[in-house]
Amino acid sequence: MLTDALILLAIALGFVVVEMTLAWLVARKLRNNGIVDIVWSAGFAPLALLYLVAGPVNGREFDLHLRWLAITAMVVVWSLRLGGHLFVRVRSHHPHEDVRYAKLREEWGAATDRKMFGFFQLQGALQVVLSLPVLLVILDGATFAAGWGLGISGCLGVAFWATGLLGESLADRQLARFRADRANKGKVCQAGLWNYSRHPNYFFEWLVWVGYAVFALGSQWGWLGLLAPALMLHFLLNVTGIPMTEELSLKSKGDAYREYQRTTSAFVPWCKKPSPASEGRSV
């Protein structure tokens, strides 16, 4: 299994280096580094298919099993949906960059292209690390004995993934509809799921990764797949997810967003805290 894993990891790393180099060249030409978000999301689909095709190594015959097909389909569907969503968003802003990348361009100055090349490659490496649950399922020798069964972990994984995919899609649609109404410019979106979480799209995105990891638990060394949702949770809560998004929202919406922070859960959808006015009326 170790030899198989190293072969597939080498193939995957080769793929993401080419993928992100091409993406960087396009981004440089268009002067829009937001392209990396599209490529990062959509790039998981060909990566999963690459694992599926290259997986039966060391002389094993190519044979499609349900667990292989299921996790590959899960990744492809999620990847293309999110990639398409981000493509629409980036295209609507172009030629203006997302504020995150515009800020980096301002900070890095003349070194922007060079530093962005490293950033793009880092995103590719992260793709390989996060794709670990898929790799573990494809490598699992027990798949041949298991035949066409998903097992308990597989069924639970699909349930988590489906809940995450539907929730994230709904949150994205609700936010897009809110922003499309010019009357809402400068206001805080509290429509639908956004009434119960300040970042429902991030929460359900994380559930998707939980689904992949739970699915992989039925494979040999499957527990290693838990690294994917753990890393994703760290990035969402502490790095480029909630902290950066909230910093920008506070700058653009001020006190309205501070009140939103006070009354609404940051991540897990939950009941709102009462406002001071409603607390006074209830006494």
Image: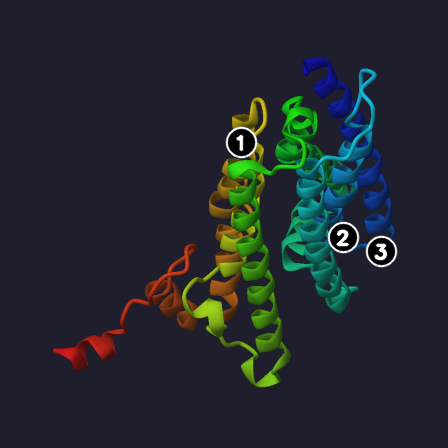
**Disc 1, disc 2: CB below 8 Å?**
no
Mark 3 secondary-structure assignment: helix
Q: Position of residue 282 (x, y in %)?
A: 16, 79
Which residue does the image show at 68% across and 59% down from the upper left? 98
Between the C-alphas of marks 3 and 1, the distance is 42 Å
Q: Which image quadrant for residue 131?
A: top right
- Residue tagged 3: 30
Label 3 with label 1: CB-CB less than 8 Å: no
Residue found 47% across the figure and 46% down from its top? 237
Which amino acid type is shown beneath numbered disc 1?
Answer: Leu
Q: Residue furthest left?
A: 283
Dot in front, 1 or 2: 1
Question: Is label 3 or label 2 in front?
Answer: 2
Q: Earlier in the sequence, mark 1 or mark 2?
A: 2
Residue type at mark 3 is Leu
Whether pointer 3 and pointer 2 mark residues with C-beta atoms closer than 8 Å, the reply is: yes
Residue name at image x 75 percent, y 60 percent: 87
Q: Nearer the viewer, residue 128 or 154?
A: 154
Number of numbered markers? 3
Label 1: which secondary element: loop
User: Is 271 on the left-hand or right-hand side of 13?
Assistant: left
Quadrant in which the C terminus is drawn: bottom left
Residue 217 - label = 1
In the rendered image, which quarter is residue 273 located in?
Answer: bottom left
Name the amino acid, label 2.
Answer: Ile
> Which element type, helix, strand or loop, lies under badge 2?
helix
Q: Residue furthest bottom?
A: 183
Quarter location, residue 69: top right
What residue sits right under mark 2 in the picture? 35
The Cα–Cα distance between marks 3 and 2, rounded to whole angstroms, is 9 Å
Among numbered discs 3 and 2, the one appearing first in the sequence: 3
